[in-house]
Image (cartoon, rainbow, N blue to C red):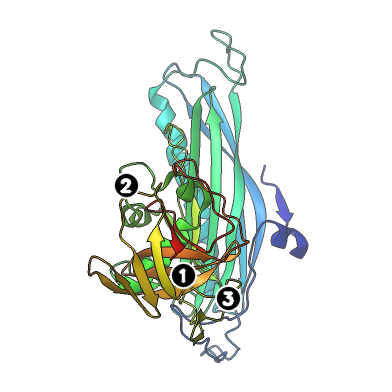
């Protein structure tokens, strides 16, 4: 039997759901004014999410029955054409349920030897009962687009973990489904730099440097399994691989729509917390860092001693520092003296909090002001 529970505004906020009004168009453009639709009412889309449950059935190779109770999102959309609202709501629920069911049916080819730690009696007909959970990562409106992104997972036996991410994004004026490149083009240097910097800021990625050990940031970003536009930026989602021993999997990042523009003076940028001396100056690697050359920063240019020159730009605050990127990759985060850094294990040296530092978690290089 289907059960529904309407989430309160406070509980929506607690789990990170964004119920947004008309808030801008794709990319970094300025939000348009609300416009009147042909139906004679204001285009003012709002999304409300409720939870419902449905029981899916399967059986293992031996014919033992499996029942999986799935909690899934039910969506109500107001302020748009009724048919578009109905189609979007149905697509969110159907996408979630159908993909969980597809994963469940894969178990018809194996033998489920246990359920809840208790072996099923031979010849018994009691079903193996399991439940799939629901986490709403985002539900709201960005510009003309409505989007609901969810995460689910269930366990069969003692080791069969099945995490999934789901997302449906639709243009609520036209009813057309959205594609990732409607919001993010990783072939664009600026977009790639913002995405890479967002990934670099993730705790797991920063700890391992890259994930897995032979994968680049670009490769990892390209494998995002779901996307959802939010007011802050484009949310990218991955389902972590439960069979992997890598400890540096990242399962969510939010890529900002635009890079913030720093203000500058003779000593460097004056925006953000790291403003006492700025990043401008000459920096050289510590002895513990991998081989690297010194670099002179005179915003917006960074010139290395080996002759390499790149344009860098500020991308945001980061734990008391200020992060910069350039040429599609992180340049480093400037930390003024007195601001400690949580140094990951892969860096052989120690933090030098009494000095200004330039730390690049991707390359594992720390530089100090010369």
Q: Which mark is residue 215?
A: 2
| Relative to 107, 148 lies left or right | right
| Relative to 68, 181 lies left or right | left
Residue toward you, 116 or 239: 239
Residue 354 percent coordinates (x, y): 59, 58
- The secondary element bearing badge 1 is classed as strand
Residue 141 percent coordinates (x, y): 56, 73
Q: Total label count?
A: 3
Residue 175 visible: no
The quarter of the picture where the N terminus appears is top right
Q: Residue 275 carries which label?
A: 3
| Relative to 217, 239 lies left or right | right
Mark 2–mark 3 Cα distance, whole angstroms, equals 34 Å
Q: Which of marks 2 and 3 is in front?
A: 3
Q: How crowded is mark 1: few (under 14 residues within 10 Å), some or many (20 or more)?
A: many
Residue 53 visible: yes
Q: Which of marks 2 and 1 is in front?
A: 2
- The secondary element bearing badge 3 is classed as loop
Sequence-earlier tag: 2 or 3:
2
Residue under label 1: 170
């Amino acid at each position: 039997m289907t059960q529904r529970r309407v989430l309160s505004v406070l509980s929506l906020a607690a789990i990170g759901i964004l119920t947004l009004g008309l808030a801008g168009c794709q990319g970094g453009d300025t939000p348009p004014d609300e416009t009147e639709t042909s139906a004679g009412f204001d285009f003012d889309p709002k999304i409300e999410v409720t939870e419902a449950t449905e029981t899916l059935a399967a059986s293992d190779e031996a014919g033992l029955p499996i029942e999986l109770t799935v909690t899934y999102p039910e969506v109500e959309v107001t302020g748009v054409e009724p048919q578009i609202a109905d189609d979007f709501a149905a697509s969110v629920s159907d996408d979630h349920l159908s993909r969980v069911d597809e994963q469940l049916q894969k178990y018809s080819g194996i033998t489920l030897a246990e359920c809840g730690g208790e072996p099923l009696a031979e010849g018994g007909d009691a079903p193996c009962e399991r439940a799939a959970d629901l986490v709403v990562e985002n539900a709201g409106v960005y510009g003309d687009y409505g989007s609901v992104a969810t995460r689910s997972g269930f366990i069969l036996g003692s080791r069969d973990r099945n995490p999934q991410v789901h997302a449906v994004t639709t243009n609520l004026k036209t009813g057309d489904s959205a594609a990732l490149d409607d919001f993010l083009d990783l072939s664009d240097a600026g977009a790639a730099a913002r995405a890479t910097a967002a990934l670099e800021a993730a705790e797991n990625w920063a700890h391992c440097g890259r994930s897995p050990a032979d994968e680049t940031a670009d490769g990892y970003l390209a494998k995002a399994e779901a996307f959802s536009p939010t007011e802050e930026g484009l949310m990218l989602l991955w389902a972590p691989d439960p069979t992997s021993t890598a400890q540096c999997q990242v399962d969510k990042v939010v890529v900002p729509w635009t890079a913030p523009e720093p203000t500058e003076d003779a000593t460097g940028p004056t925006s953000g917390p790291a403003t006492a001396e700025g990043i401008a100056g000459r920096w050289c690697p510590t002895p513990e860092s991998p081989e690297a050359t010194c670099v002179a920063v005179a915003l917006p240019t960074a010139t290395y001693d080996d002759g390499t020159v790149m344009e860098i730009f500020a991308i945001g605050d980061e734990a008391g520092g200020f992060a910069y990127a350039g040429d599609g990759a992180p340049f480093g985060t400037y930390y003024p003296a007195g601001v400690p850094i949580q140094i990951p294990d892969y860096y052989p040296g120690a933090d030098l909090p009494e000095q200004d530092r330039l730390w690049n978690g991707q390359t594992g290089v720390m530089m100090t002001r010369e």
